[in-house]
Amino acid sequence: MGTYVTQIFNGISVSSIYLMAALGLAITFGLMKVINMAHGEFIMVGAYVTFLVQNIFLRFWSGAFSIYFLVAIPIAFVVAGLFGLVLEILVIRHLYGRPLDSLLATWGVSLVLQQLARNIFGAPNVDVRSPGWLNGSVTVFNGFVMPYKRLFILLLVIICLAAVYLLLYHTSYGRRIRAVMQNRDMAASLGIPARKVDAYTFALGSGLAGIAGCALTLLGSIGPTLGTNYIVDTFMVVVLGGVGRLIGTVTGAGIIGVGGTAFEFLTNTSMAKVLIFAVVIAFLQWKPKGLFTINSRALDD
Protein backbone atom coordinates (compact mmCIF):
# COMPACT_ATOMS: atom_id res chain seq x y z
CA MET A 1 0.00 0.00 0.00
CA GLY A 2 2.82 2.37 0.89
CA THR A 3 4.45 1.77 -2.50
CA TYR A 4 1.31 2.72 -4.42
CA VAL A 5 0.65 5.83 -2.30
CA THR A 6 4.28 6.86 -2.76
CA GLN A 7 3.92 6.57 -6.53
CA ILE A 8 0.79 8.74 -6.44
CA PHE A 9 2.61 11.35 -4.33
CA ASN A 10 5.59 11.24 -6.73
CA GLY A 11 3.20 11.78 -9.64
CA ILE A 12 1.60 14.78 -7.94
CA SER A 13 5.06 16.14 -7.15
CA VAL A 14 6.16 15.80 -10.79
CA SER A 15 2.88 17.41 -11.87
CA SER A 16 3.55 20.39 -9.60
CA ILE A 17 6.96 20.90 -11.23
CA TYR A 18 5.44 20.75 -14.71
CA LEU A 19 2.67 23.11 -13.62
CA MET A 20 5.13 25.61 -12.21
CA ALA A 21 7.19 25.54 -15.41
CA ALA A 22 4.10 25.73 -17.66
CA LEU A 23 2.20 28.51 -15.85
CA GLY A 24 4.11 31.33 -17.52
CA LEU A 25 4.13 29.58 -20.89
CA ALA A 26 0.35 29.08 -20.74
CA ILE A 27 -0.16 32.83 -20.39
CA THR A 28 2.31 33.98 -23.06
CA PHE A 29 1.54 31.22 -25.57
CA GLY A 30 -2.19 31.74 -25.08
CA LEU A 31 -1.96 35.51 -25.38
CA MET A 32 0.51 36.04 -28.20
CA LYS A 33 0.57 32.65 -29.97
CA VAL A 34 4.37 32.87 -29.87
CA ILE A 35 6.30 29.60 -29.67
CA ASN A 36 8.93 30.69 -27.16
CA MET A 37 11.73 28.12 -27.24
CA ALA A 38 13.71 30.29 -24.79
CA HIS A 39 11.19 29.66 -21.99
CA GLY A 40 13.39 26.89 -20.61
CA GLU A 41 16.31 29.32 -20.37
CA PHE A 42 14.22 31.62 -18.16
CA ILE A 43 13.90 28.62 -15.85
CA MET A 44 17.69 28.36 -15.96
CA VAL A 45 18.01 32.09 -15.17
CA GLY A 46 15.88 31.65 -12.05
CA ALA A 47 18.00 28.70 -10.95
CA TYR A 48 21.29 30.58 -11.35
CA VAL A 49 19.85 33.63 -9.56
CA THR A 50 19.11 31.33 -6.61
CA PHE A 51 22.70 30.08 -6.79
CA LEU A 52 24.02 33.65 -6.70
CA VAL A 53 21.77 34.65 -3.79
CA GLN A 54 22.99 31.58 -1.91
CA ASN A 55 26.63 32.59 -2.42
CA ILE A 56 25.94 36.19 -1.38
CA PHE A 57 24.33 35.03 1.86
CA LEU A 58 27.18 32.57 2.53
CA ARG A 59 29.74 35.34 2.12
CA PHE A 60 28.06 38.35 3.75
CA TRP A 61 25.10 37.13 5.85
CA SER A 62 25.92 33.56 6.81
CA GLY A 63 23.97 33.97 10.04
CA ALA A 64 20.77 34.53 8.04
CA PHE A 65 21.40 31.68 5.60
CA SER A 66 18.18 29.94 6.62
CA ILE A 67 16.07 32.63 4.93
CA TYR A 68 18.10 32.98 1.73
CA PHE A 69 15.72 30.81 -0.30
CA LEU A 70 12.72 32.96 0.61
CA VAL A 71 14.70 36.00 -0.54
CA ALA A 72 15.78 34.25 -3.76
CA ILE A 73 12.19 33.55 -4.92
CA PRO A 74 11.12 37.19 -5.58
CA ILE A 75 14.57 38.08 -6.93
CA ALA A 76 14.42 35.17 -9.41
CA PHE A 77 10.95 36.36 -10.46
CA VAL A 78 12.14 39.93 -11.08
CA VAL A 79 15.36 39.02 -12.91
CA ALA A 80 13.73 36.43 -15.18
CA GLY A 81 10.87 38.88 -15.81
CA LEU A 82 13.35 41.57 -16.89
CA PHE A 83 15.03 39.08 -19.25
CA GLY A 84 11.61 38.32 -20.73
CA LEU A 85 10.71 42.02 -21.08
CA VAL A 86 13.96 42.73 -22.94
CA LEU A 87 13.40 39.71 -25.21
CA GLU A 88 9.86 40.84 -26.00
CA ILE A 89 10.94 44.39 -26.84
CA LEU A 90 13.99 43.45 -28.91
CA VAL A 91 12.81 40.26 -30.66
CA ILE A 92 9.28 38.99 -30.04
CA ARG A 93 7.52 42.27 -30.77
CA HIS A 94 8.74 42.19 -34.37
CA LEU A 95 7.63 38.60 -35.01
CA TYR A 96 3.93 38.56 -34.11
CA GLY A 97 1.93 36.57 -36.64
CA ARG A 98 5.07 34.73 -37.81
CA PRO A 99 5.18 31.57 -35.67
CA LEU A 100 7.98 29.82 -37.57
CA ASP A 101 10.19 32.91 -37.44
CA SER A 102 9.52 33.35 -33.72
CA LEU A 103 10.34 29.68 -33.11
CA LEU A 104 13.72 29.99 -34.85
CA ALA A 105 14.51 33.34 -33.23
CA THR A 106 13.73 32.22 -29.69
CA TRP A 107 15.62 28.97 -30.26
CA GLY A 108 18.64 31.07 -31.21
CA VAL A 109 18.13 33.20 -28.08
CA SER A 110 18.04 30.01 -25.98
CA LEU A 111 21.41 28.94 -27.41
CA VAL A 112 22.86 32.38 -26.68
CA LEU A 113 21.63 32.28 -23.06
CA GLN A 114 23.02 28.78 -22.57
CA GLN A 115 26.44 29.86 -23.84
CA LEU A 116 26.28 32.99 -21.68
CA ALA A 117 25.64 30.78 -18.64
CA ARG A 118 28.62 28.58 -19.59
CA ASN A 119 30.87 31.63 -19.90
CA ILE A 120 29.82 33.04 -16.52
CA PHE A 121 29.31 29.95 -14.36
CA GLY A 122 31.19 27.28 -16.31
CA ALA A 123 29.95 24.16 -18.10
CA PRO A 124 29.81 21.79 -15.07
CA ASN A 125 26.65 21.71 -13.01
CA VAL A 126 26.61 23.53 -9.68
CA ASP A 127 24.83 22.62 -6.45
CA VAL A 128 22.50 24.80 -4.44
CA ARG A 129 22.31 24.08 -0.72
CA SER A 130 18.81 24.03 0.64
CA PRO A 131 18.18 25.75 4.00
CA GLY A 132 18.10 23.50 7.02
CA TRP A 133 14.35 23.73 7.54
CA LEU A 134 13.78 22.11 4.14
CA ASN A 135 15.91 19.08 4.94
CA GLY A 136 14.21 15.99 6.27
CA SER A 137 10.82 14.42 5.71
CA VAL A 138 7.58 13.47 7.39
CA THR A 139 6.52 9.84 7.69
CA VAL A 140 2.77 9.44 7.24
CA PHE A 141 2.76 5.68 7.72
CA ASN A 142 5.13 2.80 7.18
CA GLY A 143 6.52 2.93 3.63
CA PHE A 144 5.16 6.42 2.80
CA VAL A 145 7.49 9.36 3.37
CA MET A 146 6.97 12.94 2.14
CA PRO A 147 10.16 15.06 1.84
CA TYR A 148 9.88 18.65 3.05
CA LYS A 149 11.36 19.89 -0.23
CA ARG A 150 8.57 18.31 -2.29
CA LEU A 151 5.94 19.63 0.09
CA PHE A 152 7.43 23.13 -0.14
CA ILE A 153 7.33 22.99 -3.94
CA LEU A 154 3.66 21.94 -3.77
CA LEU A 155 2.92 24.89 -1.49
CA LEU A 156 4.84 27.28 -3.76
CA VAL A 157 2.88 26.04 -6.80
CA ILE A 158 -0.43 26.54 -4.99
CA ILE A 159 0.54 30.10 -4.02
CA CYS A 160 1.63 30.97 -7.59
CA LEU A 161 -1.50 29.38 -9.06
CA ALA A 162 -3.74 31.34 -6.67
CA ALA A 163 -1.87 34.57 -7.47
CA VAL A 164 -2.23 34.06 -11.23
CA TYR A 165 -5.93 33.21 -10.83
CA LEU A 166 -6.57 36.37 -8.79
CA LEU A 167 -4.63 38.44 -11.33
CA LEU A 168 -6.50 37.06 -14.35
CA TYR A 169 -10.03 37.01 -12.92
CA HIS A 170 -10.15 39.67 -10.21
CA THR A 171 -8.14 42.61 -11.51
CA SER A 172 -8.60 45.11 -14.33
CA TYR A 173 -5.26 44.09 -15.82
CA GLY A 174 -6.41 40.46 -15.89
CA ARG A 175 -9.55 41.47 -17.76
CA ARG A 176 -7.35 43.22 -20.32
CA ILE A 177 -5.25 40.07 -20.73
CA ARG A 178 -8.33 37.90 -21.28
CA ALA A 179 -9.83 40.44 -23.67
CA VAL A 180 -6.70 40.48 -25.82
CA MET A 181 -6.61 36.65 -25.74
CA GLN A 182 -10.18 36.34 -26.99
CA ASN A 183 -10.24 39.11 -29.62
CA ARG A 184 -7.12 41.22 -30.03
CA ASP A 185 -8.51 43.59 -32.69
CA MET A 186 -11.72 44.29 -30.80
CA ALA A 187 -9.82 44.87 -27.55
CA ALA A 188 -7.48 47.31 -29.31
CA SER A 189 -10.42 49.16 -30.88
CA LEU A 190 -11.89 49.64 -27.38
CA GLY A 191 -8.73 51.36 -26.18
CA ILE A 192 -6.79 48.51 -24.59
CA PRO A 193 -3.06 48.94 -25.36
CA ALA A 194 -2.55 45.43 -26.73
CA ARG A 195 1.19 45.77 -27.31
CA LYS A 196 1.80 47.01 -23.77
CA VAL A 197 -0.32 44.14 -22.43
CA ASP A 198 1.80 41.76 -24.51
CA ALA A 199 5.07 43.12 -23.10
CA TYR A 200 4.02 43.07 -19.44
CA THR A 201 2.38 39.66 -19.76
CA PHE A 202 5.47 38.18 -21.42
CA ALA A 203 7.53 39.55 -18.52
CA LEU A 204 5.05 37.99 -16.06
CA GLY A 205 5.28 34.59 -17.77
CA SER A 206 9.08 34.78 -17.79
CA GLY A 207 9.09 35.68 -14.09
CA LEU A 208 6.97 32.62 -13.28
CA ALA A 209 9.52 30.52 -15.16
CA GLY A 210 12.20 32.06 -12.94
CA ILE A 211 10.30 30.91 -9.84
CA ALA A 212 10.13 27.43 -11.39
CA GLY A 213 13.93 27.48 -11.78
CA CYS A 214 14.27 28.55 -8.16
CA ALA A 215 12.13 25.57 -7.08
CA LEU A 216 14.10 23.14 -9.25
CA THR A 217 17.30 23.91 -7.34
CA LEU A 218 15.80 21.94 -4.45
CA LEU A 219 15.72 18.75 -6.53
CA GLY A 220 19.30 18.53 -7.80
CA SER A 221 22.24 20.30 -9.39
CA ILE A 222 21.70 22.97 -12.04
CA GLY A 223 23.51 23.69 -15.30
CA PRO A 224 23.28 25.65 -18.55
CA THR A 225 20.98 23.03 -20.12
CA LEU A 226 18.55 22.83 -17.19
CA GLY A 227 15.68 24.37 -19.15
CA THR A 228 15.96 22.01 -22.13
CA ASN A 229 14.94 19.13 -19.87
CA TYR A 230 11.54 20.74 -19.32
CA ILE A 231 10.66 22.75 -22.43
CA VAL A 232 9.05 19.87 -24.35
CA ASP A 233 7.01 18.74 -21.34
CA THR A 234 5.81 22.26 -20.59
CA PHE A 235 4.60 22.79 -24.16
CA MET A 236 2.89 19.41 -23.98
CA VAL A 237 1.13 20.44 -20.75
CA VAL A 238 -0.13 23.69 -22.30
CA VAL A 239 -1.30 22.12 -25.57
CA LEU A 240 -2.98 19.17 -23.84
CA GLY A 241 -4.83 21.37 -21.35
CA GLY A 242 -5.89 23.98 -23.88
CA VAL A 243 -4.05 27.16 -24.82
CA GLY A 244 -4.81 30.10 -22.56
CA ARG A 245 -6.88 28.22 -19.95
CA LEU A 246 -5.60 28.06 -16.38
CA ILE A 247 -7.72 25.04 -15.48
CA GLY A 248 -6.43 23.33 -18.62
CA THR A 249 -2.83 23.87 -17.57
CA VAL A 250 -3.52 22.38 -14.14
CA THR A 251 -5.31 19.38 -15.64
CA GLY A 252 -2.66 18.82 -18.31
CA ALA A 253 0.14 18.92 -15.73
CA GLY A 254 -1.74 16.41 -13.58
CA ILE A 255 -2.34 14.00 -16.44
CA ILE A 256 1.23 14.10 -17.73
CA GLY A 257 2.85 14.02 -14.28
CA VAL A 258 0.74 11.28 -12.70
CA GLY A 259 0.41 9.35 -15.98
CA GLY A 260 4.13 9.47 -16.65
CA THR A 261 4.94 8.30 -13.12
CA ALA A 262 2.43 5.45 -13.42
CA PHE A 263 3.88 4.33 -16.77
CA GLU A 264 7.40 4.57 -15.33
CA PHE A 265 6.35 2.39 -12.37
CA LEU A 266 4.88 -0.23 -14.70
CA THR A 267 7.65 -0.16 -17.34
CA ASN A 268 10.80 2.01 -17.32
CA THR A 269 11.74 5.66 -17.78
CA SER A 270 12.27 5.55 -21.57
CA MET A 271 9.13 3.55 -22.28
CA ALA A 272 7.11 5.82 -19.97
CA LYS A 273 8.10 8.85 -22.09
CA VAL A 274 7.07 7.03 -25.27
CA LEU A 275 3.72 5.97 -23.81
CA ILE A 276 2.79 9.40 -22.44
CA PHE A 277 3.69 11.00 -25.80
CA ALA A 278 1.54 8.43 -27.60
CA VAL A 279 -1.41 9.10 -25.27
CA VAL A 280 -1.14 12.87 -25.75
CA ILE A 281 -0.86 12.57 -29.55
CA ALA A 282 -3.86 10.23 -29.68
CA PHE A 283 -5.91 12.60 -27.52
CA LEU A 284 -5.00 15.63 -29.66
CA GLN A 285 -6.18 13.74 -32.72
CA TRP A 286 -9.58 13.62 -31.06
CA LYS A 287 -9.57 17.14 -29.53
CA PRO A 288 -6.97 19.28 -31.35
CA LYS A 289 -7.64 22.34 -29.16
CA GLY A 290 -7.01 20.46 -25.92
CA LEU A 291 -9.16 19.68 -22.93
CA PHE A 292 -10.43 23.23 -22.39
CA THR A 293 -10.84 25.97 -24.98
CA ILE A 294 -11.54 29.68 -24.78
CA ASN A 295 -15.10 30.55 -25.83
CA SER A 296 -15.11 33.59 -28.08
CA ARG A 297 -17.42 35.29 -30.57
CA ALA A 298 -14.46 36.05 -32.80
CA LEU A 299 -14.61 34.38 -36.20
CA ASP A 300 -11.93 31.83 -36.95
CA ASP A 301 -9.18 32.96 -39.31
Image (cartoon, grey):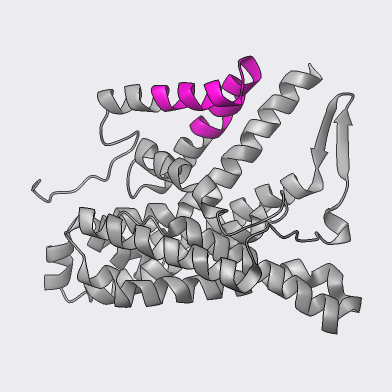
Image position of 184 (left or right of 105)? left
x%, y% of residue 231? 46, 48
The answer to if 36 sits in the magenta stretch is no
Magenta residues? Answer: 255-279
Please give the name of the residue rendered at 73% of the width and 53% of the height, measured from the top-left corner: 218
x%, y% of residue 271? 53, 21
The vertical placement of 23 against 93, above or below, is above
Please give the name of the residue rendered at 31% of the width and 64% of the height, measured from the top-left corner: 177
Q: Is residue 226 visible?
A: yes
The answer to if 257 sits in the magenta stretch is yes
The vertical placement of 87 against 231, above or below, is below
Please give the name of the residue rendered at 26% of the width and 60% of the height, measured from the top-left corner: 102
Q: Nearer the viewer, residue 7 or 158?
A: 7
Image position of 100 (left or right of 54)? left
Q: Nearer the viewer, residue 253 or 174?
A: 253
**In which quarter of the view is residue 122 placed?**
bottom right
x%, y% of residue 110? 43, 61
Image position of 281 (left or right of 265)? left
The vertical placement of 32 against 237, above or below, is below
